[in-house]
Amino acid sequence: MHPPPVTAAVRVRRAEVSDLDDLVALEESSFAQDRLSRAQYRKHLDSESALVLVASANHRRFLGTAVVFFRKGSTVARLYSIATTPQAQGKGVGSALVEASEDTARARGCRALRLEVRKDNAVAIRLYERLGYHAIGEYTRYYADGADALRFEKPL
């Protein structure tokens, strides 16, 4: 008997305070710099202008997270951050998180979702392009380590 693929049971929901340990651990293992702190996550959980989503499977197995920011009076939402656990990579978890972010932005009346991605992150760039995002700009030395970023956008 093979275990069912992770994708079969991916569930995306709004993060809760009980997710904080998982969120911080994933943030620390995923990003060397430009990390969200525990306090920032805590603040975003209760914020009108932010949405923290988590993907899980089989009784709360934590697989990943996405953070979306909304600006008052703007119809453009920003996918600020997305991360998946190593065992979830390549199994549709990132796609599920991006699609849930789009659904939420659409439900809030947004017309587009924007994001920045490291120019050297070919895997993420392929995911965004496959999901209908297109490059609209470029930022030199955008990240703390000096890496360049591409800005992507998708009309909703």
Image (cartoon, helix red, strand yellow):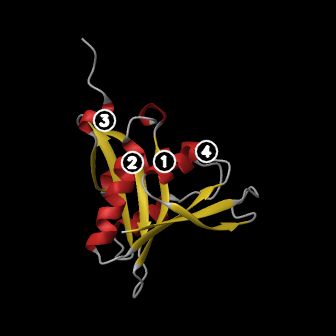
Looking at the rendered structure, the number of numbered marks drawn on it comes to: 4
Q: Is residue 50 above or below residue 3?
A: below
Front-most of residues 82 and 46? 82
The residue singled out by tag 1 in the image is 127
> Residue at position x 34%, y 70% from top?
105
Residue hosting label 3: 7
Label 1 Cα neighbours within 10 Å, binned few <14 / some 14-19 / many ≥20? some
Which secondary structure lies at badge 1?
helix
Q: Residue at x 41, y 72 (%)?
A: 112
- Indicate the secondary structure of the residue bearing disc 2: helix
Q: Residue furthest bottom?
A: 73
Secondary structure type for disc 3: helix
Which residue is denoted by mark 2 in the rendering? 95
Amino acid type indicated by mark 1? Leu
Q: Which residue is mark 4?
A: 122
For marks 1 and 4, give the CA distance: 9 Å
Looking at the picture, does residue 92 appear above or below residue 138? above
Q: Earlier in the sequence, mark 4 or mark 2?
A: 2
Whole-number angstrom distance, CA of label 3 to CA of label 4: 22 Å
State yes or no: discs 2 and 1 in contact (Cβ < 8 Å): yes
In the depicted view, which residue is nearer to us: 10 or 50?
Answer: 10
Lower position in the chain sequence, tag 3 or tag 1: 3
Say what amino acid the circle numbered 3 marks: Thr
